Image: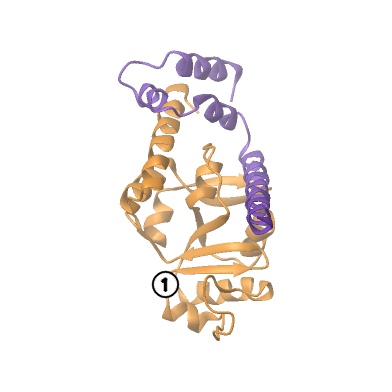
Chain colours: A purple, B orange
């Protein structure tokens, strides 16, 4: 993502064009900043983020399981 | 989840596959997190042999099946089935012979993009393909994903990404 594309992306998510999917998503409550942050990454960096996210999700699930078992 | 190792193992064995599902969403820029890796694979005899050879060292077994249920992961088993949800030493791997809304490997490949991940080129389902597949799957979580994917597509078109 070039600096120009980045600037445009932030402008678009701050003031989405009326009637666009961006406007619809903002209204729906999707965090558009997360999408821009992801688009700034390379595919390999996105893949690494996915692996890290899956690991964190698994840890949370295990912690929840342990908590329920201790009750 | 061992994404890098999984992709390398499949690549090294010459398996024909397309990355689909949550991993494809993330690679295309979505913030979606998934625990399993989904692939669409070619159903040619050669590819079934390659896939069986690639995964065998990682002890594939059917997910949610009784532990004592006999399961031989080889080309013959792959030939008899279509979609396989597997537990392996590499994590949960799903291999689909067909994807809802898209069709078989060739149809899925036709709407995929070549993307370099961990230094290797892989076919990854495009945003347009993901939207079509998620719409066809039609579950509540899929429809949420469609919103995410549509906005990504809009953003990429408007910024020229």
Residue B11 location, quadrant = bottom right
Chain of residue at mark 1 = B
- Which residue is located at x 63 percent, y 62 percent? B91
- Which residue is located at x 63 percent, y 51 percent? A64
Mark 1, secondary structure of its residue: loop
Q: Is residue B17 visible?
A: yes
Q: Tell whether A31 sits left or right of B3.
A: left
Residue B109 location, quadrant = bottom left
- Which residue is located at x 60 percent, y 28 percent? A40
Q: Nearer the viewer, residue B120 or A57?
A: A57
* Percent coordinates x, y for residue A61 in the rendering: 62, 52
Q: Tell whether B27 sits left or right of B130.
A: right
* Percent coordinates x, y for residue B101 in the rendering: 32, 54
Q: Nearer the viewer, residue B119 or B64?
A: B64
Q: Is residue B129 visible?
A: no
Residue A22, compared with residue A66, is above or below; it is above
Q: Nearer the viewer, residue A53 or A67?
A: A67
């Amino acid at each position: 993502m070039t600096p120009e594309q980045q600037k445009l992306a932030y402008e678009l998510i701050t003031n989405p064009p009326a009637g666009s999917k961006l406007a619809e998503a903002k209204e729906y409550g999707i965090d558009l900043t997360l999408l821009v942050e992801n688009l700034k990454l390379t595919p390999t960096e996105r893949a690494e983020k996915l692996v890290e996210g899956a690991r964190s999700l698994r840890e949370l699930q295990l912690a929840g399981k342990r908590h329920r078992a201790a009750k | 989840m061992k994404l890098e190792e999984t992709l390398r193992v499949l690549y090294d064995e010459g398996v024909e596959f397309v990355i689909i599902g949550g991993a494809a969403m993330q690679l295309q820029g979505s913030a979606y997190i998934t625990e399993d890796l989904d692939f669409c694979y070619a159903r040619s005899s050669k590819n079934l042999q390659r896939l069986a050879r690639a995964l065998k060292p990682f002890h594939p077994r059917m997910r949610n099946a009784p532990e004592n249920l006999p399961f031989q992961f080889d080309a013959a088993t792959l030939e008899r089935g279509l979609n396989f949800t597997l537990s392996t030493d590499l994590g949960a791997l799903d291999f689909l012979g067909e994807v809802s809304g898209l069709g078989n490997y060739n149809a899925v490949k036709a709407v995929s993009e070549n993307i370099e991940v961990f230094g290797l080129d892989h076919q990854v389902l495009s945003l347009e393909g993901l939207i079509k597949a998620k719409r066809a799957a039609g579950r509540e979580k899929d429809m949420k994903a469609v919103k995410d994917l549509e906005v990504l597509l809009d953003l990429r078109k408007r910024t020229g990404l």
